[in-house]
Image (tube, helix red, strand yellow):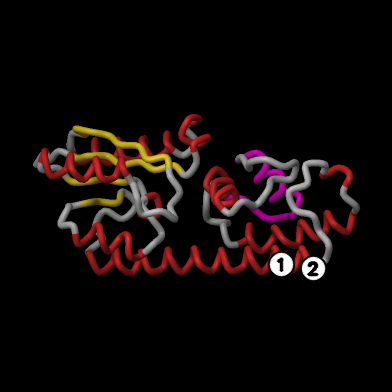
Amino acid sequence: MSAPIVAYYRVSTDKQGKSGHGLEAQRATVEAFAKSHSWPIVAEFTEVETGKRNDRPQLNAALKACKKQKARLVIAKLDRLSRKLSFITMLIDSNIDFVCCDNPHATKLTLHILGAMGEHERDMISKRTKEALAAAKQRGVVLGNPNVGKMNSDAAMARDAFLRPILETMLAMPLREIAQELNNRNIPAPRGGAWGATSVMRVMKRLGIAAK
């Protein structure tokens, strides 16, 4: 039976919002999902925001559209909504029917479990990042220096040692999403500035880490 849906997309930085990085993949996933079920997309909302905040004006607008048009909310992946369990629980308790394309048959219990796992993963990555930063600073490494070519070999090796464990926790993620996570954690790219899929690929290749 045909049922209207409201699509919600989220990208984490203004730059990614303008460039479409991540957004195109989310839209393609939702559109394919909707087409396979013959569900018409009656509205689309795109949030340019960090997943650490709960104030989502576009999500609020999407929820209002769902109530008004008696539609269900559809997102590409649960982590595009949030990695905070409390936020996911709040949405479940709002009584708005929502579907994650990557796990369309998830029950409320499953969503709670996935939300808890996502929050735990976020916390562990944050913990490892802080520990690696502290260790690097103790060794005298200056992170974020745009003149990487002038860094001595010890500093370069320390930077690689800092990045390796972080990247190894993200092997299952696409390169663009890895870049997004690194940018979210304010980890500078090799030449300063923001990470991109290409810079992630180069670093992983240099470190001998197999990218997906």
Q: Which residue is mark 1?
A: 134
Give the side of residue 26 with respect to residue 176, left or right: left
Count residues near mark 2 (Cα–Cα under 10 Å), then give few for <14, some for 14-19, many for 20+. few
- Of residues 97 and 141, the one nearer the viewer is 141
C-alpha distance separating marks 1 and 2: 6 Å
Q: Measuring from the top left, give residue 118's x and y in whole percent.
A: 42, 63
Q: What residue do we see at 29% from left, 63% from top?
A: 111
Looking at the image, is 53 positioned above or below residue 117?
A: above
Badge 1: residue crowd in 10 Å (few <14, some 14–19, many ≥20): some
99 to 118, vertically: above or below: above
Type of secondary structure dominating the magenta stretch: helix
Residue in view at x 17 percent, y 52 percent: 97
Give x and y (percent) for residue 43: 23, 33
Q: As shown in the figure, which amino acid type bears the numbered disc 1?
A: Ala
Give the number of the disc on residue 138: 2
Image-based side of 24 in relation to 196, left or right: left
Residue nearer the viewer, 38 or 160: 160
Under circle 1, the secondary element is helix
- In the rendered image, residue 204 lying in the magenta stretch gets the answer yes
The quadrant of the rendering that contains the N terminus is top left
Report the magenta residues as a range: 197-212
Q: Position of residue 164 (x, y in %)?
A: 70, 60
| Closer-to-camera residue (21/202) | 21
Residue 50 part of the magenta-drawn span:
no
Q: Position of residue 186 (x, y in %)?
A: 61, 51
